[in-house]
Image: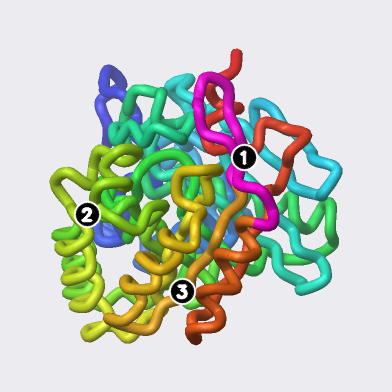
Amino acid sequence: MRDNTEVKIDIRNIDKSDLDKFIQELGQPKFKSNQIWEWVWKKSKTDFNAMRNLPKDLIATLEENFVFHPVIVDKVQKSNDGTIKSRLKLHDEHLVESVLIPVEKDNRYTACVSSQVGCSLTCSFCATGKMKRMRNLGPAEIYDQVVLVDKQTQEYFDHKLTNIVFMGMGEPLLNYKNLLTSINYICSDEGLGMSPRRITVSTVGIAKMIKKLADDDVKFNLALSLHAPTDEKRSKIMPINETNDLSSLMEALKYYYSKTKNRISYEYISFKGFNDTLEDAANLFKLTRFFPVKINIIEYNPIDGVKFEKSLSVSIDNFAKYLRERGVMVTVRRSRGKDIDAACGQLANKG
């Protein structure tokens, strides 16, 4: 039993073996641990009194020893195009964001989730990059975002969430353990049961961690936030490139693909006059020859205080055409949520 002077911990911050041991020490049968685990991770309950098949004395003991720190919706913005952005408050008052991106014609409803409070990587085009990294999100805080966005999807579109992208605030591979733990809760049969093939983790490119993903035999998809096709240009906008240059990233991604055969995408935000010429397209094409790759060209969503502008539509179209003519799979993602604070970090930065 926990000393009353100790701070109670979120029950979702212990693993199953710890819960099994706790229940055993109470003299309760092990299946009670399985029931609690199911209420927490499969049914997403954050109130012990909602666990209806538990005896009252066990609920009282759980409340005496543990708490829940659920993520709470602090503010919601809805775009005319259907995009819904939520600012979320954590138990320590920090703020993060999640986004629901609906594409109704394709029956595709995607949750964009955050992995850190702020970010330490200072990419020059990103609102989150202007925020100091305060801490990593815990597995339950990542999981909660998925649950909340799924509820929004059902409420507004009468549909279940279909996809998850780790493209919100923070660098997922700098929160590696919690990232993989959260995905396990999201994908396992004891959790939400979502297919890992419907999850994409986006990284700015940390070569050694990409290799670790391969060694851990992950099943989800990987996206590299590339945004420039040469070291010279990439280093101007993404300081991480100084220590993880394109050569090291291509080597890591080749290793990742050889081990996992998982899909790899390049995320490429198109900036007017910086990376949107046919010469840039030719340099980008050179980076598609090492393994099968899909390129997502993204229309930039401008933010205050940043010099970059979105490319002209004709520039994006010509860029995409150049690559398609050479057999590269290309999609163009037009900017969503233009009438709200849709860019990553914009809403969390607001008071």
Query: Which sits in the foreground, 313 or 333?
Result: 313
Q: Which residue is drawn at 49% across and 63% down?
A: 278
The residue closer to the viewer here, 301 or 161, is 301
Q: Earlier in the sequence, mark 1 or mark 2?
A: 2
- Residue 123: x, y in percent? 36, 36
Q: Is residue 32 visible in this depiction of the protein?
A: no
Q: Which numbered marker is on residue 301?
A: 1
Residue type at numbered disc 3: Pro
Check disc 1 and give the amino acid type.
Asn
Q: Distance between the residues labelled 3 and 1?
A: 28 Å
Q: Where is residue 320 in the image (x, y as percent from the top left)?
A: 58, 68
User: Residue 57 location, x and y as percent?
Assistant: 48, 44
- Chief secondary structure of the magenta span? loop
Viewer-proximal residue among 293 and 192: 293
Q: Which residue is at the front of the view, 174 or 180?
A: 174
| Inter-mark Cα distance, 1 to 2 | 25 Å
| Residue 292 falls in image quadrant | bottom left
Residue beneath the point at 35% across and 65% down: 283
Q: Classify mark 1: residues with Cα within 10 Å, few (<14), some (14-19) or many (20+).
A: many
- For the N terminus, the quadrant is top left
> Which numbered tag is attached to residue 3?
none
Residue where numbered disc 3 is placed? 196
To which residue does mark 2 refer?
206
Magenta-tinted stretch: 300-314
| Residue 239 pos. (x, y %) | 25, 38
